[in-house]
Amino acid sequence: MPGIDLKDLQALYARGVNIIEHLERLGVDRHAAIEMSYDLQAGSYIDIIRTTHVEYSLKYTSEIASVIDGLGVDVASLLEAGVGEATTLANVVNRMKKRPSHVSGFDISWSRIKYAYKYYSSVAGGPANFFLGDLFRIPFADDSVDVVYTSHSIEPNGGREAEALTELYRVTRKYLVLLEPSYELATDEGKARIERLGFIRGLPEAAKKLGYHIKEYRAASVSARPSNPTAILVIEKNASAASGPAPGFVCPVGKGPLVKIPGGYWSESALLLYPELDGVACLTPRHGVVATHYADFHEDRSA
């Protein structure tokens, strides 16, 4: 990041400094601050799940699996938006009655995606598709994933609740399941923390204003921080829809299909190239490289 010394940030993170708050005081926009903070945290969630939060992880992921199983639909494809290190996704998949054929997850942190591949392989096994993506510009087509869910992924994006819901709903085929903090159910201490950190609030109200059908809204049976309780919001989109093939990548800018090329992806719809770095597809708008004449040299790679 221009003007930001990541080595200095590493040292601050090691001392327990809140990186998002620190960067915002320096004038860094919130989205970039979240990205840097999350990348610095990479690997820490795996350590926590394997040491101090073993019982919590079991109860939490069992509840998510139960909610998804209870939808009563065929879940051939499952996406976790904001997958982090896949500590939630891997254990949810393990606890579902029927493993989805197509499992995907994205995050804004490259380092966390690398950890996600490693953790998922060791815990759940089987194929999974993890990639760098933006919650507000998901590189999947409309109605392409049977069930999409989040686990405190929308949380730091206060003020963008409707925007996040709209994008998540767009790629959902059957159900959208959100496990996010509830300002309304929080203690006074929790509410003060949410306000101070600029976290989300009022997700159910935002969903209603968008005209979405809320099937269920309740407090989760377990929360990592009791003063900041997790709520489960289930939004039904089209429960009777037939499951489709594995979701394919689309350009996060032009929304047209992406063509796999050596070292990345080509978007004919937006005339952009997206890199693949050490096996991780980088599919956020800011990773797009302007290549208006790419087709002049590769006519065989049009979509």
Image: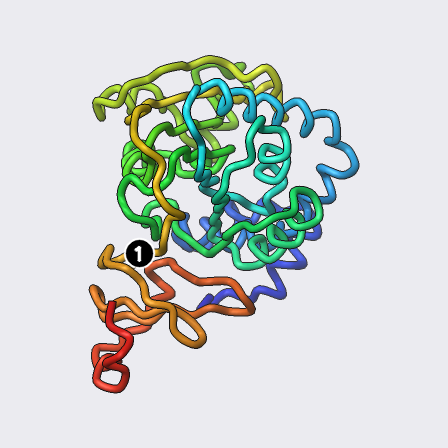
Colour scheme of this structure image? rainbow
- Farthest residue to the bottom: give it: 297
Quarter of the picture holding the C terminus: bottom left
Q: Quadrant of residue 144?
A: top left
- Please indicate, yes or no, whether residue 190 appears anywhere in the rendered image: no
120 vs 300, left or right, is right
Question: Nearest the camera: 254 or 145?
Answer: 145
Query: Can you give x and y, in whole percent of width and height, for residue 197 in the image?
Result: 48, 35
SS label for mark 1? loop
Residue at the location (74% across, 44% down)?
47
91 vs 165, left or right, is right
Residue with the mark numbered 1: 250
Query: Can you give x and y, in whole percent of width and height, for residue 3 in the image?
Result: 46, 68
Residue at the location (21% across, 85% down)?
296
Residue at the location (61% across, 48% down)?
126
In the rendered image, the vertical position of residue 226 relative to residue 241, given as above or below:
above
101 vs 148, left or right, is right
**Other residues around mark 1 within 10 Å, as few (<14) / some (14–19) / many (≥20):** many
Question: Nearest the camera: 207 or 74?
Answer: 74
Q: Amino acid at mark 1?
A: Val
Query: Can you give x and y, in whole percent of width and height, for residue 292 in the image?
Result: 21, 77
Query: Can you give x and y, in whole percent of width and height, for residue 140 in the image?
Result: 33, 49
In the rendered image, the vertical position of residue 194 relative to residue 231, given as above or below:
below
- Please indicate, yes or no, whether residue 193 appears anywhere in the rendered image: yes
Residue at the location (22% across, 26% down)?
210
In the rendered image, the vertical position of residue 183 relative to residue 96, given as above or below:
above
